[in-house]
Amino acid sequence: MSLIQSFWEVFNKSILDYHKLDNVDTKIKNPYNKEEINFLMYEKNWVDTIQWHLEDIIRNPTIDPIEALELKRKIDASNQIRTDKVELIDDWFLVHYNNPKVLNEAKLNTESLAWAIDRLSILALKIYHMQVEVNRKEAVVEHIEKCNKKLNILLEQKIDLIEAIEDLLLEIEAGRIKMKVYRQMKMYNDEELNPILYLNKNK
């Protein structure tokens, strides 16, 4: 099993662990050692899984506006945590896979390894929930058939994405692609950068 395939297994373990209770307030119980990269992968997917369900809840057409505002702030906070986790993953790759002998003709990739892995984590959630729809006993045949077609596309995408990330990692190891990371520098949660926050901070 490749490194990226092992991450896929971790993502699915996180998703299955969450759905034992299926509650957005469930506290994480990370089964991996803090020194392992899988510890960080489990945390990353757990954040994604919680946020997936927060996004579902906030779309309830009968939701109380006050509850919706609270949820929106939870989602904003979750987005920041998600970004922080991705950057920690990039830091890990910079330490463990950065090739000091980069070729002169080496190019940059459009996204970092960690952001590609972020897409894989979200894809694991899409596949899990599409499978749920395929298995819905009360659903009409047309719904199940439509979801089954979507599931097959997602499963194909999983194969392609894992292969693409593995290829990217090989290219980095060979020095044909430079590993360079730009921090996201999100502004909306920062009291020093969001004018709505800093203009109202002392009121």
Image (cartoon, rainbow, N blue to C red):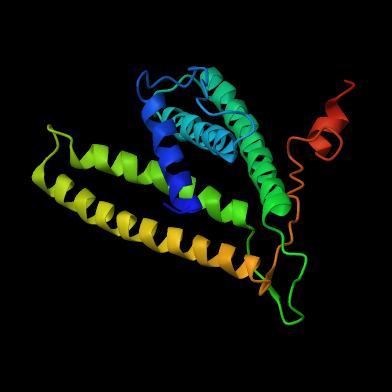
Q: Quadrant of residue 129?
A: top left
Q: Residue at x 44, y 58 (%)?
A: 162
Left or right: 24 as drawn, with respect to 98: left
In this view of the protein, which residue sits in the foreground, 174 or 25?
174
In this view of the protein, which residue sits in the foreground, 82 or 66?
82
Q: Position of residue 15 (x, y in %)?
A: 40, 33
Q: Residue at x 84, y 40 (%)?
A: 193
Image label count: 0
In this view of the protein, which residue sits in the foreground, 63 or 193?
193
Outermost residue on the right side: it is 202
Q: Position of residue 161 (x, y in %)?
A: 44, 60
Q: Quadrant of residue 17?
A: top left
Q: Position of residue 4 (x, y in %)?
A: 49, 52
Outermost residue on the left side: it is 141
Left or right: 147 as drawn, with respect to 19: left
Q: Residue at x 42, y 19 (%)?
A: 23
Rendered position, 18 above or below 144: above
Outermost residue on the bottom side: it is 105
Left or right: 172 as drawn, with respect to 43: right
Q: Residue at x 71, y 59 (%)?
A: 98
Q: Quadrant of the C terminus?
A: top right
Rendered position, 145 above or below 26: below
Left or right: 44 as drawn, with respect to 105: left
Q: Position of residue 51 (x, y in %)?
A: 51, 33
